[in-house]
Amino acid sequence: MNNGFILVVDDNPTNLAVISQALRTEGWQVRIAVDGEDALNKVVQNPPELILLDVQMPGLDGFEVCKRVKADKATSDIPIIFMTALSDTDSKVKGLALGGVDYIVKPFEQQEAIARVRVHLQLRYLTQTLEQQIRDRTQALSQALEELQHSHLQVIQSEKMSALGNLVAGVAHEINNPIGCVVGNVSAVEATIKDLFGVIDLYGKHFPNPGAEIEDELEAIDLDYLREDLPKLVKAMRDGSDRIVSISRSLSTFSRADTDRKQAFDIHEGIDSTILILRHRLKANEHRPEIQVWMDYGTLPLVECFPGQLNQVFMNILANAIDAIDEANQGRSAAELEANPNCIKIQTALSGDYVQITIFDNGTGMSEEVRSRIFDHLYTTKTVGKGTGLGLAIAQQIIEEKHGGTIEVNSELSKGTTFMIKIPVLPHTF
């Protein structure tokens, strides 16, 4: 409080000297002004802690000076104590209404004046201290709220991925058991069919005339056709079972549980498994043709990361891309769809020490206002019940905070959206 100064404003040199000396005796720094204009200039140049202001002065009187000081946001909180010989109630009320905090009536008692000054300086100091405490508490609460939001995202992310991972892993496990039986027996069936045809050929060699009944039956079943078609049926069974094994493997890749340490991971496997999970949404429906997925994969090293979390990022971005394409197809004609087919393009490349993943869709695109807010917590453009506003906020947190990478988006209304993700190849630690 003593680091500032008190400004004394009075056109009477005797009054200035007396009050200034009394204030300095108490240890306060004092500056003086001899009229209203002088006072305003000093207040603007270097605001004081308190102003002792004479009311009756030539030119700008004390009331006008007070009015101007209070009108300026930079100086409005400076306490002003009026010094005046006017003791009528109207003058006091006018001064207080203009923003004055107190009155000292001339001729004044020195101790009373000192006491009033001390009280208002203490009030100013306490007010400033309280305001700083409020600012500090507000900042602390804001930080706590931000940390709580991050924790909230973590909990939702963990629970969501855990539930989805358990579901997908369970489905993969249930598929593995029966398909394992099929795959294991296809080879045996092929060998058995080969043996049976061999025996039939052997009988034909040794018994060229088997009799009318057997010949009629061979003609009825069309043995030559069976000999050609049955191996094809078995091969189709093998191809189908191999496809199911591939799907099961992709499901297991997608649902891969994260540990507390990063693991070496093939980014392409993660993208492929995510597309597989979303395959049913890519197919043609009554509103639009099939969404084509074009992949341009570069040669990438394994990345030290949390695979389950990265798969969640791919899931969020690709699911949003499908939503955007579905929205863009509303009202489009067949000619428009043929001229600009629905597509999602995924490109990967090694860029220095980073793996770069680019995901483009030719959906509705976004306005600049929406684009600038898509990573905000709880922000969504989807209708009630269809969006939480957490997906891309979590994606940003996973890429930037968990992996030390970057995620950016470029978009233009009616022209589509591109997400660009960079993830360091080597593990990122804080």
Image (cartoon, rainbow, N blue to C red):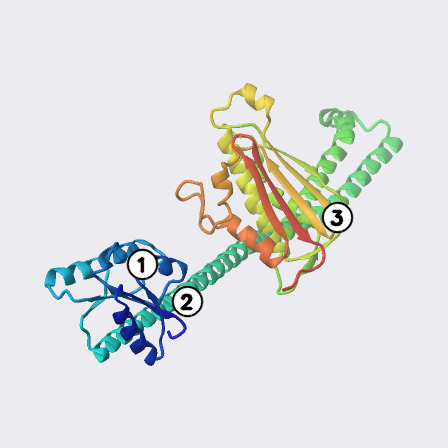
Residue 256 location, quadrant: bottom right
N-terminal of the two: label 2 or label 3? 2
Residue 29: image quadrant is bottom left
Q: Secondary structure at mark 2?
A: helix
Left/right placement of residue 161 relative to residue 60 reads right
Q: Determine the image quadrant of residue 130.
A: bottom left
| Sooner in the amino-acid sequence: mark 1 or mark 2 | 1
Give the percent coordinates (x, y) of residue 269: 68, 48
Q: Is residue 255 visible?
A: no
Q: Circle 3 sits in a helix, a strand or a loop, which is it?
A: loop
**Residue carrying label 1:** 76
Q: Which residue is mark 3?
A: 300
Name the residue carrying label 2.
Answer: 136
296 relative to 252, above or below? above
Count of numbered circles in the view: 3
Depth check: give the residue in front, 120 or 274. Answer: 120
